[in-house]
Image (cartoon, rainbow, N blue to C red):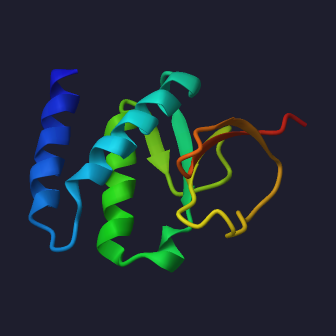
């Protein structure tokens, strides 16, 4: 926990130096990602997908991805819809999520959702 807290503090300090970043967004995301962590398996690989690739500059895309990686440690977070569990972040609720075969586990009403792969 101390290591994760130190990593988050370092990330927070770096992000404060990025022009146009709002520190408030970090706290809001951190709380929701912690709630998502309670729904996800305690370890293993978790998929991640976002529509930020199309709607935000690369700095914001990477910031959210890194924040998810740190908050979900020790899980490994990969940009993929092919994992048994997938955390998604939709900045635009109207954007379609690619892929199929996923069942909604929990919608956090903040753009973050957890999906599980359909069992065959």
Q: Residue furthest right?
A: 120
* Coordinates of residue 69 in the picture (x, y in percent): 37, 44
Q: Residue at x 51, y 32 (%)?
A: 36
Determine whether, in the image, residue 113 is placed left or right of residue 57: right
Q: Is residue 113 visible?
A: yes
Tell me if residue 2 comes above or below residue 108 in the rendering: above
* Coordinates of residue 106 in the picture (x, y in percent): 66, 34
Foreground: 34 or 7?
34
Q: Residue at x 53, y 38 (%)?
A: 45
* Coordinates of residue 89 in the picture (x, y in percent): 54, 54
Query: What quarter of the picture does the C terminus occupy?
Result: top right
* Coordinates of residue 29 in the picture (x, y in percent): 38, 45
Residue 32 sits in quarter: top left
Q: Residue at x 22, y 31 (%)?
A: 4
Tell me if residue 56 comes above or below residue 2 in the rendering: below
Q: Is residue 69 visible?
A: no
Determine whether, in the image, residue 75 is placed left or right of residue 110: left
Query: What quarter of the picture does the N terminus occupy?
Result: top left
Residue 80 sits in quarter: bottom right
Determine whether, in the image, residue 67 is placed left or right of residue 113: left
How many discs mark residues in the rendered view?
Answer: 0
Tell me if residue 52 comes above or below residue 41 in the rendering: below
Foreground: 61 or 112?
112
Tell me if residue 106 comes above or below residue 39 in the rendering: below
Residue 68 sits in quarter: top left
């Amino acid at each position: 926990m101390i290591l994760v807290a130190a990593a988050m503090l370092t990330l927070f300090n770096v992000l404060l130096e990025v022009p146009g970043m709002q520190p408030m967004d970090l706290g809001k995301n951190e709380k929701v990602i912690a709630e998502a962590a309670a729904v996800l398996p305690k370890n293993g690989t978790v998929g991640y997908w976002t529509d930020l690739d199309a709607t935000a500059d690369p700095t914001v895309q990477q910031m959210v991805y890194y924040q998810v990686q740190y908050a979900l440690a020790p899980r490994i977070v990969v940009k993929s819809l092919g994992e048994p569990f997938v955390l998604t972040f939709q900045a635009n609720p109207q954007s379609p999520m690619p892929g199929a075969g996923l069942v909604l586990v929990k919608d956090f009403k903040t753009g973050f959702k957890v999906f599980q792969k359909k069992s065959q």
